[in-house]
Image: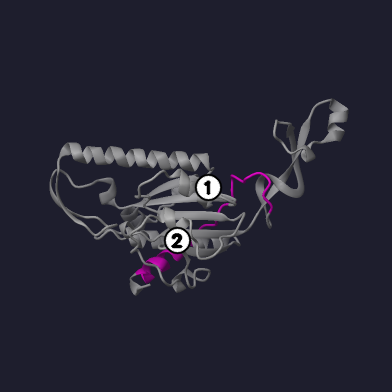
Amino acid sequence: MTGTYDEYLARGMQAGLRYRLAPPRHIPQGLMGEQLGNRPGSSLEFMDHRDYLPGDDLRRIDWSAYARSDKLTVRLYREEINPHLDIILDGSMSMALSGTEKPGSSVAIAAMMAQAAANAGFSYKLWLASDYCIDLPGGSGLPTHWQGIQFNYRGSPVDSLSHPTGRMRSRAMRLLISDLLWAGDPMQPMLQLSRDASSVFVIQVLATVDIEPPGPGNLRLLDSETGQLLEVYIDTAARQQYLDRLARHQQLWQQACQHCGAAMTVVTAESYLQTFELKDFIVNGIIQ
């Protein structure tokens, strides 16, 4: 990693000192781990009863209660989680959009979340979605010691998520930091991220120009994934078409996140670095 990100890593750590990683709110039924959470799960600590539903584990039925009331109920226990956060940073070239704060903001958010995890007693590890999902050197240490962050991948992060260089922790929390500006159905990467995880968070980092593209006129565009230079004329209709497609793309990601029990937050890179406003992170249950 070049020294250009040192300032962002330090600023992110400083912002994270005020917060703690929130415990998972959505726990896949039947998972076991090492730390008690707040929702029903499969530890040995009794929590409550609820009515039996078709498909419930028959071993959870409280037969003594059935003998007394002639009503089927199941015993609920507190869930357990692995106190660990895997942070996956999108290493695509689009994340290093020239003239924007997208790369610095993404790095700062990763450092902030690592610090918040440490404050909550969680371990963490930084991964880079590049040719593979790479376990970066120093990724479990202080963010200011992280090495190897580069935004130069020309492929799709979906492919790299399928080929990690190491094994992510099961029953742990996972966080994807990306602009999400890659083609394809978001359900596939979300299913990959949520498999064996206690919970998943997605933070979409967009530059101001991603959200509000230039008005009508001649533009020279560089495809960040292929390196191809394009000369185009953007009129009002084309600009609106882009905005509509972006909105639809975000809606598909929101739906995929909801399907997998994940929380998604959208961040504007330039605004985030000016204020480090984290209200949406708190509302979505990412930090507290």
Q: Which residue is depicted at the point 24% across and 55% down?
A: 223
Q: Which mark is residue 285?
A: 1
Query: Which x, y percent locates residue 123?
Result: 58, 64
Callout 2 secondary element: helix
Nearer to me, 97 or 111: 97
In this view, the mark in front (1 or 2): 2
Query: Which x, y percent locates residue 243?
Result: 27, 40
Marks 1 & 2, CB-CB < 8 Å contact? no
Q: Quadrant of residue 90?
A: bottom left
Image vertical order of residue 107 relative to residue 190, above or below: below
Residue 123 visible somewhere in the drawing? yes
Please, which residue is most extreme toward the top here?
70
Image vertical order of residue 276 relative to residue 249, above or below: below
Marks 1 and 2, Cα distance to the nearest angstrom? Answer: 16 Å
Label 1 CA crowd tier, 10 Å (few <14, some 14–19, many 20+): some
Q: Is residue 192 left or right of residue 236?
A: right
Please, which residue is most extreme toward the left here?
218
Residue 15 visible somewhere in the drawing? no
Q: Which residue is depicted at the point 67% across and 49% down?
A: 31
- As for residue 22 lying within the magenta part, the answer is yes
Q: Which residue is depicted at the point 44% across and 58% down?
A: 160
Give the residues drawn in magenta, as a range. 5-32
Label 2 sits on residue: 110
Q: Is residue 218 left or right of residue 262?
A: left
Q: Which residue is depicted at the point 73% across and 50% down?
A: 43
- Name the quarter where the N terminus is drawn: bottom left
